[in-house]
Image (cartoon, rainbow, N blue to C red):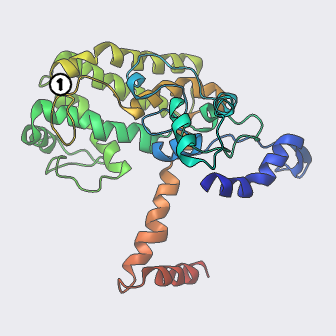
Amino acid sequence: LFHQCLDIVVEPLKTAARIGRMMSDPVGNLRHCFTPLAAYIVDTPEACMLACVRGKTSPVTMASYKEFGDAFCHEQRTRATTLAQLARITCDPDDVERYFTQCECFRLSGVAEPFFRDWPLSDPANFFSPEALHHWYGEFWDHDVQWCKNALGSQELDFRYSVLQPIVGLRHFKDGITTLKQVTGRAKRDVQRYIVPVIAGAMPTGAVIAIRALMDFRYLAQAHVLTSSTRDKIKDALAKFHEHKSTITDEGLRRGAKSGAALDHWQIPKLELMQSVAPSVSQIGVPVQWSADTTEHAHVEVIKDPAASTNHHNFDSQICRYLDRIER
Protein backbone atom coordinates (compact mmCIF):
# COMPACT_ATOMS: atom_id res chain seq x y z
CA LEU A 1 0.00 0.00 0.00
CA PHE A 2 2.81 2.41 0.87
CA HIS A 3 4.52 1.78 -2.46
CA GLN A 4 1.22 2.33 -4.30
CA CYS A 5 0.73 5.64 -2.50
CA LEU A 6 4.27 6.72 -3.35
CA ASP A 7 3.61 5.80 -6.98
CA ILE A 8 0.77 8.30 -7.08
CA VAL A 9 2.66 11.05 -5.27
CA VAL A 10 5.90 10.89 -7.26
CA GLU A 11 4.47 10.17 -10.71
CA PRO A 12 5.23 13.73 -11.95
CA LEU A 13 8.84 13.30 -10.83
CA LYS A 14 9.10 9.99 -12.66
CA THR A 15 7.77 11.61 -15.82
CA ALA A 16 10.29 14.43 -15.50
CA ALA A 17 13.06 11.87 -14.96
CA ARG A 18 12.11 10.11 -18.21
CA ILE A 19 11.47 13.01 -20.59
CA GLY A 20 12.62 16.06 -18.64
CA ARG A 21 10.80 19.25 -17.80
CA MET A 22 11.52 22.93 -18.32
CA MET A 23 12.32 24.64 -15.02
CA SER A 24 13.64 28.05 -14.04
CA ASP A 25 17.05 28.33 -12.44
CA PRO A 26 17.77 30.91 -9.68
CA VAL A 27 18.62 33.53 -12.31
CA GLY A 28 15.37 32.97 -14.18
CA ASN A 29 16.72 31.05 -17.17
CA LEU A 30 14.76 28.04 -18.37
CA ARG A 31 16.56 24.70 -18.10
CA HIS A 32 15.60 21.27 -19.38
CA CYS A 33 15.79 19.31 -16.11
CA PHE A 34 15.57 15.65 -15.18
CA THR A 35 14.61 14.42 -11.71
CA PRO A 36 16.12 11.09 -10.64
CA LEU A 37 15.66 10.17 -7.00
CA ALA A 38 18.81 11.61 -5.45
CA ALA A 39 18.26 10.89 -1.76
CA TYR A 40 15.61 9.41 0.52
CA ILE A 41 16.33 10.13 4.19
CA VAL A 42 14.91 7.36 6.38
CA ASP A 43 15.86 5.14 9.30
CA THR A 44 16.88 1.51 8.78
CA PRO A 45 13.41 -0.14 9.16
CA GLU A 46 11.85 2.31 6.71
CA ALA A 47 14.74 1.80 4.30
CA CYS A 48 14.14 -1.96 4.33
CA MET A 49 10.45 -1.39 3.67
CA LEU A 50 11.18 0.92 0.74
CA ALA A 51 13.88 -1.36 -0.68
CA CYS A 52 11.39 -4.27 -0.55
CA VAL A 53 13.65 -6.44 1.60
CA ARG A 54 12.97 -8.37 4.77
CA GLY A 55 14.35 -7.50 8.16
CA LYS A 56 17.97 -8.39 8.89
CA THR A 57 18.81 -7.56 5.28
CA SER A 58 20.76 -4.56 4.05
CA PRO A 59 18.66 -2.10 2.02
CA VAL A 60 21.71 -0.81 0.11
CA THR A 61 23.76 -3.96 -0.52
CA MET A 62 23.11 -7.65 -1.09
CA ALA A 63 24.33 -8.54 2.41
CA SER A 64 22.16 -10.43 4.87
CA TYR A 65 22.46 -10.44 8.65
CA LYS A 66 25.19 -13.09 8.73
CA GLU A 67 27.39 -10.81 6.62
CA PHE A 68 26.84 -7.55 8.51
CA GLY A 69 30.20 -7.87 10.26
CA ASP A 70 32.26 -8.29 7.10
CA ALA A 71 35.16 -5.90 6.66
CA PHE A 72 34.27 -5.01 3.07
CA CYS A 73 31.38 -3.51 1.13
CA HIS A 74 29.13 -6.07 -0.52
CA GLU A 75 27.60 -5.81 -3.98
CA GLN A 76 25.27 -2.84 -4.30
CA ARG A 77 21.51 -3.36 -4.33
CA THR A 78 20.28 -1.83 -7.57
CA ARG A 79 16.89 -1.39 -9.15
CA ALA A 80 17.81 -3.89 -11.87
CA THR A 81 18.79 -6.51 -9.30
CA THR A 82 15.55 -6.20 -7.35
CA LEU A 83 13.41 -6.30 -10.51
CA ALA A 84 15.34 -9.33 -11.77
CA GLN A 85 14.67 -11.16 -8.51
CA LEU A 86 10.97 -10.27 -8.68
CA ALA A 87 10.84 -11.51 -12.28
CA ARG A 88 12.06 -14.93 -11.13
CA ILE A 89 9.05 -15.30 -8.85
CA THR A 90 6.52 -17.20 -10.92
CA CYS A 91 3.38 -17.31 -8.78
CA ASP A 92 0.60 -14.74 -8.67
CA PRO A 93 1.11 -11.96 -6.07
CA ASP A 94 -2.53 -12.41 -5.10
CA ASP A 95 -1.63 -15.87 -3.85
CA VAL A 96 -0.11 -14.25 -0.80
CA GLU A 97 1.19 -17.31 1.02
CA ARG A 98 2.98 -18.82 -1.99
CA TYR A 99 4.25 -15.43 -3.12
CA PHE A 100 5.77 -14.67 0.28
CA THR A 101 7.37 -18.11 0.35
CA GLN A 102 9.09 -17.52 -2.99
CA CYS A 103 10.12 -14.00 -1.96
CA GLU A 104 11.82 -15.45 1.09
CA CYS A 105 14.41 -17.13 -1.13
CA PHE A 106 15.63 -13.68 -2.20
CA ARG A 107 14.99 -12.09 1.22
CA LEU A 108 12.36 -9.83 -0.34
CA SER A 109 9.45 -8.47 1.65
CA GLY A 110 6.69 -9.43 -0.79
CA VAL A 111 6.12 -6.09 -2.56
CA ALA A 112 5.36 -6.93 -6.18
CA GLU A 113 5.76 -3.44 -7.64
CA PRO A 114 8.40 -1.25 -5.95
CA PHE A 115 7.78 2.45 -6.32
CA PHE A 116 11.21 2.91 -7.95
CA ARG A 117 10.69 0.23 -10.62
CA ASP A 118 10.05 2.76 -13.42
CA TRP A 119 12.09 5.66 -12.04
CA PRO A 120 15.22 6.07 -14.20
CA LEU A 121 18.63 6.26 -12.51
CA SER A 122 17.12 5.46 -9.12
CA ASP A 123 18.86 2.65 -7.26
CA PRO A 124 18.44 1.89 -3.54
CA ALA A 125 22.22 1.78 -3.17
CA ASN A 126 22.34 5.42 -4.26
CA PHE A 127 19.21 7.13 -2.99
CA PHE A 128 19.34 5.67 0.53
CA SER A 129 21.87 8.19 1.76
CA PRO A 130 24.01 7.65 4.88
CA GLU A 131 22.25 9.23 7.84
CA ALA A 132 24.26 10.42 10.83
CA LEU A 133 21.50 10.79 13.42
CA HIS A 134 19.98 7.31 13.22
CA HIS A 135 22.86 5.30 11.80
CA TRP A 136 26.07 6.63 13.35
CA TYR A 137 24.82 8.13 16.61
CA GLY A 138 22.38 5.26 17.02
CA GLU A 139 25.15 2.71 16.60
CA PHE A 140 27.30 4.59 19.08
CA TRP A 141 24.65 4.68 21.80
CA ASP A 142 23.24 1.20 21.23
CA HIS A 143 26.58 -0.58 20.94
CA ASP A 144 29.73 1.42 21.71
CA VAL A 145 28.39 2.76 24.99
CA GLN A 146 27.14 -0.70 25.95
CA TRP A 147 30.58 -2.21 25.35
CA CYS A 148 32.07 0.43 27.62
CA LYS A 149 29.40 -0.18 30.26
CA ASN A 150 30.05 -3.93 30.17
CA ALA A 151 33.79 -3.37 30.51
CA LEU A 152 33.81 -0.76 33.26
CA GLY A 153 30.47 -1.27 34.95
CA SER A 154 27.75 1.36 35.14
CA GLN A 155 28.99 2.93 38.37
CA GLU A 156 32.58 3.31 37.20
CA LEU A 157 31.52 4.69 33.82
CA ASP A 158 29.20 7.21 35.46
CA PHE A 159 31.90 8.18 37.95
CA ARG A 160 34.44 8.84 35.21
CA TYR A 161 31.99 11.07 33.37
CA SER A 162 30.97 12.91 36.54
CA VAL A 163 34.53 13.88 37.52
CA LEU A 164 35.44 15.34 34.15
CA GLN A 165 36.34 19.01 34.25
CA PRO A 166 33.36 21.10 33.07
CA ILE A 167 34.14 22.89 29.82
CA VAL A 168 32.32 26.00 28.65
CA GLY A 169 30.19 25.14 25.64
CA LEU A 170 30.17 21.39 26.31
CA ARG A 171 27.67 19.46 28.38
CA HIS A 172 28.81 18.16 31.75
CA PHE A 173 27.31 14.86 32.92
CA LYS A 174 27.43 15.34 36.68
CA ASP A 175 25.28 12.23 37.26
CA GLY A 176 26.89 10.08 34.57
CA ILE A 177 25.31 8.76 31.39
CA THR A 178 23.83 5.34 32.13
CA THR A 179 20.66 6.75 33.68
CA LEU A 180 19.84 9.13 30.83
CA LYS A 181 16.31 8.79 29.46
CA GLN A 182 15.06 9.65 25.97
CA VAL A 183 18.56 10.40 24.76
CA THR A 184 18.52 12.90 21.91
CA GLY A 185 20.98 13.16 19.06
CA ARG A 186 22.60 16.15 20.73
CA ALA A 187 23.11 14.19 23.96
CA LYS A 188 24.70 11.34 22.02
CA ARG A 189 27.08 13.80 20.37
CA ASP A 190 27.97 15.22 23.78
CA VAL A 191 28.64 11.76 25.22
CA GLN A 192 30.88 10.67 22.37
CA ARG A 193 33.10 13.73 22.77
CA TYR A 194 34.46 12.26 26.00
CA ILE A 195 34.22 8.52 25.39
CA VAL A 196 37.83 7.80 24.36
CA PRO A 197 39.60 9.51 27.30
CA VAL A 198 37.00 8.12 29.70
CA ILE A 199 37.71 4.49 28.76
CA ALA A 200 41.46 4.86 28.19
CA GLY A 201 43.37 2.65 30.60
CA ALA A 202 40.24 0.88 31.83
CA MET A 203 39.40 -1.25 28.78
CA PRO A 204 41.58 -3.67 26.82
CA THR A 205 43.81 -1.82 24.37
CA GLY A 206 42.27 -3.49 21.33
CA ALA A 207 38.77 -2.46 22.41
CA VAL A 208 39.86 1.15 22.94
CA ILE A 209 41.46 1.20 19.49
CA ALA A 210 38.26 -0.21 17.94
CA ILE A 211 36.03 2.39 19.61
CA ARG A 212 38.50 5.15 18.76
CA ALA A 213 38.45 4.00 15.12
CA LEU A 214 34.66 4.28 15.01
CA MET A 215 34.92 7.76 16.51
CA ASP A 216 37.42 8.73 13.81
CA PHE A 217 35.01 7.36 11.23
CA ARG A 218 32.10 9.45 12.53
CA TYR A 219 34.01 12.70 12.75
CA LEU A 220 35.62 12.26 9.34
CA ALA A 221 32.31 11.35 7.70
CA GLN A 222 30.64 14.47 9.12
CA ALA A 223 33.05 16.82 7.36
CA HIS A 224 31.40 19.46 5.20
CA VAL A 225 34.06 18.99 2.53
CA LEU A 226 35.35 15.54 1.62
CA THR A 227 38.31 14.95 -0.67
CA SER A 228 39.59 11.66 -2.02
CA SER A 229 42.20 11.56 0.75
CA THR A 230 39.53 12.11 3.41
CA ARG A 231 37.45 9.36 1.87
CA ASP A 232 40.45 7.04 2.12
CA LYS A 233 40.83 7.97 5.79
CA ILE A 234 37.17 7.03 6.34
CA LYS A 235 37.85 3.62 4.82
CA ASP A 236 41.02 3.21 6.89
CA ALA A 237 39.20 4.08 10.13
CA LEU A 238 36.54 1.46 9.44
CA ALA A 239 39.19 -1.07 8.48
CA LYS A 240 41.02 -0.42 11.76
CA PHE A 241 37.84 -1.13 13.70
CA HIS A 242 37.39 -4.46 11.94
CA GLU A 243 41.03 -5.25 12.60
CA HIS A 244 40.60 -4.85 16.38
CA LYS A 245 36.92 -5.70 16.92
CA SER A 246 37.78 -9.27 17.93
CA THR A 247 39.01 -7.93 21.27
CA ILE A 248 35.46 -6.82 22.08
CA THR A 249 34.01 -10.29 21.53
CA ASP A 250 37.00 -12.08 23.07
CA GLU A 251 36.52 -10.12 26.29
CA GLY A 252 32.76 -10.75 26.27
CA LEU A 253 31.91 -7.06 26.00
CA ARG A 254 29.31 -7.51 23.28
CA ARG A 255 26.22 -8.94 24.95
CA GLY A 256 22.56 -9.47 24.18
CA ALA A 257 20.32 -6.60 25.25
CA LYS A 258 17.77 -8.89 26.93
CA SER A 259 19.68 -12.05 27.78
CA GLY A 260 22.93 -10.41 28.79
CA ALA A 261 24.78 -13.37 27.30
CA ALA A 262 28.03 -12.78 25.43
CA LEU A 263 27.68 -12.63 21.65
CA ASP A 264 30.35 -13.76 19.21
CA HIS A 265 28.81 -12.32 16.04
CA TRP A 266 28.52 -8.84 14.51
CA GLN A 267 24.98 -8.85 13.18
CA ILE A 268 24.59 -5.08 13.49
CA PRO A 269 22.74 -3.48 10.55
CA LYS A 270 24.11 0.00 11.24
CA LEU A 271 27.65 -1.39 11.17
CA GLU A 272 27.09 -2.82 7.70
CA LEU A 273 25.65 0.49 6.49
CA MET A 274 28.92 2.20 7.40
CA GLN A 275 30.61 0.32 4.55
CA SER A 276 28.50 2.31 2.08
CA VAL A 277 29.51 5.75 3.37
CA ALA A 278 32.74 6.15 1.42
CA PRO A 279 31.29 4.89 -1.90
CA SER A 280 28.27 7.20 -1.51
CA VAL A 281 30.45 10.32 -1.42
CA SER A 282 31.16 10.13 -5.15
CA GLN A 283 27.48 9.46 -5.86
CA ILE A 284 25.55 12.00 -3.76
CA GLY A 285 28.16 14.16 -2.04
CA VAL A 286 28.98 14.64 1.63
CA PRO A 287 26.75 12.58 3.96
CA VAL A 288 26.21 15.34 6.52
CA GLN A 289 23.84 17.16 4.16
CA TRP A 290 21.40 14.25 4.40
CA SER A 291 21.06 14.24 8.18
CA ALA A 292 17.57 13.84 9.63
CA ASP A 293 18.23 16.42 12.36
CA THR A 294 15.95 18.99 10.74
CA THR A 295 13.00 16.68 10.23
CA GLU A 296 13.40 15.08 13.66
CA HIS A 297 13.44 18.53 15.27
CA ALA A 298 10.05 19.10 13.67
CA HIS A 299 8.68 16.60 16.22
CA VAL A 300 9.47 19.19 18.87
CA GLU A 301 8.15 22.22 17.03
CA VAL A 302 5.05 20.62 15.53
CA ILE A 303 4.07 18.04 18.15
CA LYS A 304 5.69 18.38 21.57
CA ASP A 305 5.56 22.16 22.01
CA PRO A 306 1.94 22.49 20.84
CA ALA A 307 0.95 19.49 22.98
CA ALA A 308 2.29 21.24 26.07
CA SER A 309 -0.26 24.01 25.49
CA THR A 310 -3.25 21.66 25.45
CA ASN A 311 -5.41 20.34 28.27
CA HIS A 312 -4.01 16.85 27.49
CA HIS A 313 -7.29 15.70 25.97
CA ASN A 314 -8.14 15.51 22.25
CA PHE A 315 -4.59 16.36 21.23
CA ASP A 316 -5.13 16.31 17.47
CA SER A 317 -7.67 19.09 17.19
CA GLN A 318 -5.90 21.32 19.71
CA ILE A 319 -2.49 20.89 18.09
CA CYS A 320 -3.95 21.73 14.68
CA ARG A 321 -5.63 24.82 16.10
CA TYR A 322 -2.37 25.87 17.79
CA LEU A 323 -0.36 25.49 14.59
CA ASP A 324 -3.00 27.33 12.59
CA ARG A 325 -2.84 30.30 14.94
CA ILE A 326 0.96 30.33 14.98
CA GLU A 327 1.15 30.34 11.18
CA ARG A 328 -1.21 33.29 11.00
Can residue 47 be seen at all in this image of the molecule? no
Q: Residue at point 67% right, 55% down?
A: 4
| Above or below 246: residue 51 | below
Which quadrant of the structure image shows residue 103?
top right
Can residue 124 be seen at all in this image of the molecule? yes
Residue 92 lies, in percent from the top left, at: 66, 43
Instruction: Report the front residue among 306 and 161.
Output: 306
Q: Residue at point 45% right, 70% down?
A: 303
Which quadrant of the structure image shows residue 287?
top right
Q: Is residue 118 left or right of residue 56?
A: right
| Above or below 292: residue 285 | above
Disc 1 marks which amino acid?
A: Ala
Residue 139 lies, in percent from the top left, at: 35, 37
Label 1 Cα crowd, 10 Å radius (few <14 / some 14-19 / many 20+): some
Q: Is residue 85 left or right of residue 146?
A: right
Residue 55 lies, in percent from the top left, at: 44, 39
Q: Which residue is mark 1?
A: 200
Residue 73 lies, in percent from the top left, at: 50, 19
Q: Residue at point 40% right, 15% down?
A: 239
